[in-house]
Image (cartoon, rainbow, N blue to C red):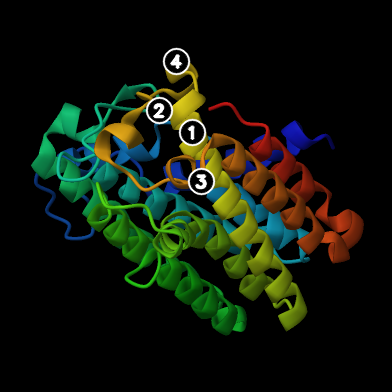
């Protein structure tokens, strides 16, 4: 199977699972306490089902399959991870954060539904992600430990010592003098943690050994940092039409970025080294890692 066919297969699994666990509801004020009110559900679905590359859930499914795990057990964790990623984007776009008007080529959630409802859409996706993870764990009692460890890995790297920590320091660092240690912390937690989380979750679901876990952790970190450096570069040199959002915003907001701290050429060199190291870190998996290698190469070549 060629790479794009495999990627589409994983995306199809994710889309089908998200639609299944978050269907559109019709009751404005549902009598059943287990049903999401219609408007809240609409706001959540607006951003969750807006398309995108589904990078993180695809990574989880691909790693699980590479390690010999059961994809059926991994579908809901993959969908939950996309919910967490989407909630972070909704909140990131808010006036109190990056104040963006467009995401994935269309108006951001708060531009359509208002700031209050956008906050609740993000809150809803975050909480529903954990509800889904816990419900899925209960459905597989024979692999309960694997599911609990997978959920913990996702929660840790999305939480107050992970992505949220990186976002917090990123916000605090606006218009500050660039600092390499602070920048490394921001990128590790703001971006790399949520790319490492799916790999660790897959490893725990598949019952992988410590060596495999460490290799996947290194792969995730290298991909995450390189991805963020490239994202910073795209904000400087990218095509707004391809990106689906405005460019030049990092400089306007006084963001701490690799190009701002080290210059464009040094940033490109650092990114290239990290992409090479990412491939090296999974070399021990041999041919089983063919998709992961191509995944990294495709991300490396991205223009949007």
Q: Of the two numbered discs 4 and 3 on the same chain, state the one appearing first in sequence.
A: 4
Instruction: Please say if the residues under marks 3 and 1 sit with CB atoms less than 8 Å apart.
Output: no
Quick check: 16 left or right of 296?
Answer: left
Instruction: Please say if the residues under marks 1 and 4 sit with CB atoms less than 8 Å apart.
Output: no
| Residue 286 x, y percent position in the rendering | 90, 59
Q: Of the two numbered discs 4 and 2 on the same chain, state the one appearing first in sequence.
A: 2
Circle on res. 250: none
| Residue 252 against residue 57 in the figure, above or below | above
Q: Which residue is mark 3?
A: 262
Quick check: 245 left or right of 293?
Answer: left
Q: Of the two numbered discs 3 and 2 on the same chain, state the one appearing first in sequence.
A: 2
Which one is in front in this view, the residue at disc 4 or the one at disc 3? 3
Which one is in front in this view, the residue at disc 3 or the one at disc 2? 3
Q: Which residue is mark 1?
A: 52
Q: Of the two numbered discs 2 and 1 on the same chain, state the one appearing first in sequence.
A: 1
Marks 4/2: CA–CA distance: 10 Å
Instruction: Name the element at disc 1.
Output: loop
Between 226 and 47, the residue placed more toward the observer is: 226
Marks 4/3: CA–CA distance: 27 Å
Instruction: Name the element at disc 4.
Output: helix
Circle on res. 104: 2
| Residue 154 x, y percent position in the rendering | 47, 67
Packing grade of label 1 (10 A; few <14, some 14-19, many >=20) is: few
């Amino acid at each position: 199977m060629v790479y794009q066919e495999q990627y589409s297969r994983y995306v199809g699994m994710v889309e089908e699972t998200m639609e299944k666990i978050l269907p559109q509801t019709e009751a404005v004020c549902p009598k059943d306490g287990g049903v999401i009110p219609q408007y809240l559900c609409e706001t959540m679905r607006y951003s969750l089902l807006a398309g995108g590359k589904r990078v993180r859930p695809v990574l989880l499914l691909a790693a699980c399959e590479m390690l010999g795990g059961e994809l059926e057990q991994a579908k809901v964790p993959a969908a939950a991870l996309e919910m967490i990623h989407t909630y972070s984007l909704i909140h990131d776009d808010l006036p109190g954060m990056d104040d963006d008007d467009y995401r994935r080529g269309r108006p951001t959630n708060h531009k359509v539904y208002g700031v209050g409802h956008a906050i609740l859409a993000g809150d809803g996706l975050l909480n529903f992600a954990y509800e889904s993870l816990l419900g899925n764990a209960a459905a597989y009692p024979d692999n309960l430990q694997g599911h609990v460890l997978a959920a913990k890995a996702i929660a840790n790297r999305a939480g107050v010592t992970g992505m949220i920590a990186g976002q917090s320091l990123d916000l605090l660092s606006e218009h500050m003098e660039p600092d390499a240690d602070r920048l490394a912390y921001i990128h590790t937690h703001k971006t790399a943690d949520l790319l490492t989380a799916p790999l660790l979750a897959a490893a725990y679901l598949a019952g992988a050994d410590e060596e495999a876990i460490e290799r996947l952790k290194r792969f995730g970190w290298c991909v995450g940092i390189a991805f963020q450096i490239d994202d910073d570069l795209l904000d400087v040199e990218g095509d707004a039409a391809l990106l689906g959002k405005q460019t030049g915003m990092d400089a306007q907001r006084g963001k701490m970025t690799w190009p701002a701290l080290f210059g464009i050429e040094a940033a490109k060199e650092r990114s290239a080294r990290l992409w090479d190291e990412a491939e090296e870190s999974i070399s021990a998996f041999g041919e089983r890692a063919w998709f992961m290698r191509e995944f990294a190469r495709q991300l490396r070549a991205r223009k949007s």
